[in-house]
Amino acid sequence: MHHLVELCVYTIASGGHTWAGGLQYLPERIIGRTSRDFDACDAIWCFFRAHHR
């Protein structure tokens, strides 16, 4: 039995321990910068929309 697997890897330069495109919920000096160049929710939705079960 063969299964096809797709893997997407994103690297966010200068991002902190935050959700990309989310809220800056703590000061940057504590958790780093929240990336505004990328929206993690959109990326996840696009992936699942393209991979119907």
Image: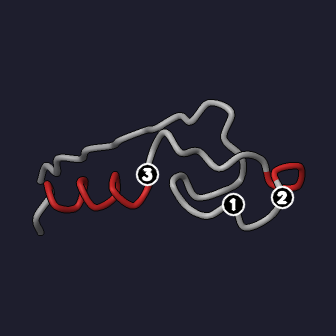
**Residue at the spot 28% in from the left edge and 61% down from the top edge:** 45
Most extreme residue toward the top is: 13
Cα separation, mark 3 vs mark 1, equals: 13 Å
What kind of element bears circle 1? loop
Residue 34 location (% of width, % of height): 65, 50
The reply to whether the C-beta atoms of the residues labelled 2 and 1 are less than 8 Å apart is: yes
Which residue is at 53% across, 45% downward? Answer: 36
| Number of disc labels | 3
Location of residue 25 (image quadrant): bottom right
Closer to the camera, 5 or 36? 36
Q: Amino acid at mark 3?
A: Asp
The amino acid sitting under disc 2 is Pro
Q: Earlier in the sequence, mark 3 or mark 1?
A: 1
CA separation in Å, label 2 and label 1: 7 Å
Q: Residue at x 80, y 64 (%)?
A: 26
Asked if marks 3 and 2 touch (Cβ < 8 Å), the reply is: no
Q: In this orientation, which residue lies closer to the viewer: 47 or 23? A: 23
In terms of sequence position, does the residue under pointer 3 or pointer 2 come before the other?
Answer: 2
Residue sitting at 88 percent across and 55 percent down?
Answer: 30
Residue named by callout 3: 39
